[in-house]
Image: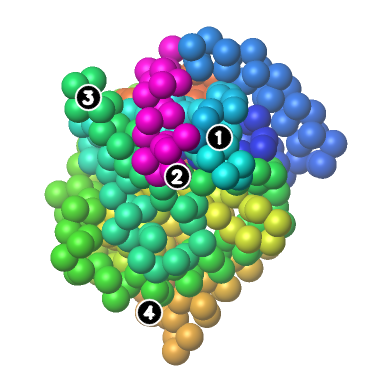
Amino acid sequence: MGDGPCALAVPAGGLWFQYAAGHGHAATSAVVKRRNGERLRERVGARYAAIRRPDDGSLERVLGRLLEQGTAIVERKPNVCTSRFGSEVITCRDRGGAIHRLLCKYGPTAAGSGHGHRGGVAYEGAVYRHALEPEGVGTARLWAVHDEREEGLTWLVIDYFDGAERANWDSAAILPAARWIARFHATMERRVDAPELAFLSRYDERYLAPWAARADRLVAETGRRRFAWWPRLSEHFRECVELLLGAPTTVIHGEFYPSNVLRVGDAIRPVDWESAAVGAGEIDLASLVEGWPEKLARECVENYRVIRWPQGAPASFERVLDAARVYLALRWLGDESVPNNKNSKRREKAHYDELDRAARRLGMIA
């Protein structure tokens, strides 16, 4: 998470940051936000230097094909929200004098992690080209996916949103985001079997079922201390898998956390689509409302329900939503690629708490 454009220099994606913003006072959030921004700015120079970036000449040649010959780079700056893949903000001037602001993301052409959960830059480019652009849903404009075959590097070039704010620090953006994702799911549900979307990952039984065992391997000791039912987790998780497999499928973002949602004026602009897949839309909804106050979360759930299913939601909707919460907690706990640092430890506690609440509502534990 966190490779899209932003005006807010805060680490992306994580319950801890959402809890701080959602449950703390405004002054506290401002202090945390400022401190995180200062820490990130201290690191961004070294991180930017380590990115495999093209030289100015190569970049201008590619931009010249996108815009017009004679396009010149005015400025290259690090994208402070870069996480898994390096990215930078390019300001360029075309031959006619027009200024363009673009986000360029760079990554290995063959890349994937998270046991099929995350794709790479090339995969994300395909999501933009085949799933998002044809529907005109308001995401960033795709300019190009460019392969440097000899170097095994792919560039993703999309619009940069100046003045964008990430929703993880803006509770007022959460309800509009819930409405946006409900409309998106309703639109994309009819396209899940379209030939051009056959490349998308599928949240089938083969993908979903192993997450409980992975979490057990990584955090079994802590899990057993917190939950008496942890040793039987795989057995209980089967119920969640069945609920998710039985739900109506659509194209999902896959990591629809507020850190991957931008607000540009009044518009919602989700970014970082490398985890897009076909699965239960409740997964995106659960990601969005995770860690926010109950009143706001319920308002989002009710708005999503009405917008996606005007004629009435499936009877299993609430249970599928809780199954999605269990899946998300286990996916984070069971992903060995998640960094082991102070922030991940804070998020881990929040995931345990979310897992406990959802499991109780599902009757997995008394």
In this view of the protein, which residue sits in the foreground, 330 or 236? 330
Q: Tag 2's secondary structure?
A: loop
Q: In which quadrant of the rendered image does the N terminus lie?
A: top left
How packed mark 4 is, by other alpha carbons closer than 10 Å (few <14, some 14-19, many 20 or more), is few
The type of residue carrying mark 3 is Gly
How packed mark 1 is, by other alpha carbons closer than 10 Å (few <14, some 14-19, many 20 or more), is many
Which is nearer the N-term, disc 2 or disc 3? 2
User: How far from the left and from the top, in percent, is residue 189?
Assistant: 32, 72
Which is nearer the N-term, disc 2 or disc 1? 2
In this view of the protein, which residue sits in the foreground, 230 or 60? 60
Q: Tag 1's secondary structure?
A: strand
Is residue 53 one of those drawn in magenta? yes
Residue at the far right: name it.
27
Pointer 1 residue: 92
On the picture, is 60 further left or further right than 335?
right
Q: CA distance from mark 4 to mark 2?
A: 47 Å
**In the rendered structure, which segment of residues is drawn in magenta?**
50-70
Pointer 2 residue: 67
Which is nearer the N-term, disc 3 or disc 4? 3
Q: CA distance from mark 2 to mark 3?
A: 24 Å
Quadrant in the picture for residue 12: top right
Q: CA distance from mark 2 to mark 1?
A: 10 Å
Q: Residue at x 52, y 80 (%)?
A: 306
Q: Nearer the viewer, mark 1 or mark 3?
A: 1
The type of residue carrying mark 4 is Pro
Q: How many marks?
A: 4
Pointer 4 residue: 314
